[in-house]
Amino acid sequence: MEIRTFQPRDGPAVSGIIVRCLREVNSRDYPAEIIARMCAHFSDRRIEQLARERQMFVAAEEQAVVGTVSRDGNKVFTMFVEPTMIGRGVGRQLMHHIEGLAADEGYDHMETGASITAHEFYLRLGYADVRTSETEFGFNYILRKPLSRQRQ
Ligand SMILES: CC(C)(COP(=O)(O)OP(=O)(O)OC[C@H]1O[C@@H](n2cnc3c(N)ncnc32)[C@H](O)[C@@H]1OP(=O)(O)O)[C@@H](O)C(=O)NCCC(=O)NCCS
C-alpha cells in the first residue's frame, strides 16, 4: 500500500469513501439528519477545496484509493477508510504518516477531533481524551498524542 499526496483527480474517490463510511459505519452512532448533512458537505468539489487548504493524503492499493487523511500542522482532519478495508491497518499507517511529518516540523503533540465511531481507534493509537465538543456534525471527542522527533 502506498501513501501519497492527494491529486485533484482523487476528489470523487475520496468523496465516495467518506460518504460510504458515513452511511455504512458512522450511521451506527449518529442520527440520520447529521449523516445526511455530512454527506452533503463532503462533495467532490468540497474535497478538492479542502485539499488546497490542508495537506491531504490518500492510501492507494493497486491504484485504488482505500483511505484518506488530512492535516493542518498538528491537527488531524478527514480520516476515513473504505468500509471494506476497515480493520487492516490502513488508518494506522495514514496516521503514522502525518504524525511523522508533524514531528519533523517540531510539533510536540498531535490533535484530532474524533467521531464516537473512531474514538477507540485513536485511543488504540496512543491518543488521550482532552475534552468533548458539540458541532454541527454532532458529538466529538478531542484527543491529543505526544510526538517525539524520532519517527516510529
Ligand atoms: C476509524 C477508522 C479510520 C480506523 O481505520 P482502520 O484502518 O480500520 O484502523 P486500523 O486497522 O489501522 O486499526 C488500528 C488499531 O485500532 C483498532 N481499532 C480500529 N477501529 C476500532 C474500533 N472501532 N474499536 C476498537 N478498536 C479499533 C484496531 O483493532 C487496531 O488495533 P491493533 O493495535 O490491535 O492492531 C475507520 O474505521 C473508519 O474510517 N471509520 C469510519 C469513519 C470515521 O469514523 N472516521 C473518523 C472520523 S473522526
Image: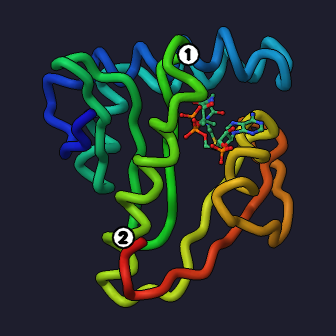
| Residue at (63% x, 19% y) in the render | 22
Determine the secondary structure under disc 1.
helix
Q: Position of residue 26 (x, y in %)?
A: 72, 23
Placement of 121 over or under 15, stated as above or below: below
Colour scheme employed for the rendering of this structure: rainbow
The answer to whether 138 appears left or right of 96 in the picture is right
Placement of 81 over or under 13, stated as above or below: below
Image quadrant of ligand 1 equals top right
**Residue nearest the observer in this picture, 10 or 94:** 94
Q: Quadrant of residue 28?
A: top right
The answer to whether 76 appears left or right of 69 in the picture is right
First along the sequence among labels 2 and 1: 1
The answer to whether 108 appears left or right of 121 in the picture is left
Task: Classify 10 Å Cα crowding around label 1: few (below 14), some (14-19), many (20 and above).
Answer: some
| Residue at (30% x, 37% y) in the render | 58
Report the quarter where the N terminus lies.
top left
Report the quarter where the C terminus lies.
bottom left
Q: What residue is pinned by disc 1?
A: 83
Q: Quadrant of residue 139?
A: top right
Please give the label number shown on residue 48: none
Q: What residue is pinned by disc 2?
A: 100
Say what amino acid the circle numbered 2 marks.
Answer: Gly
Q: Quadrant of residue 39?
A: top right
Whether label 1 lies within 8 Å of ligand 1 gets the answer yes
| Residue at (21% x, 25% y) in the render | 10
Q: Position of residue 117 (x, y in %)?
A: 76, 34
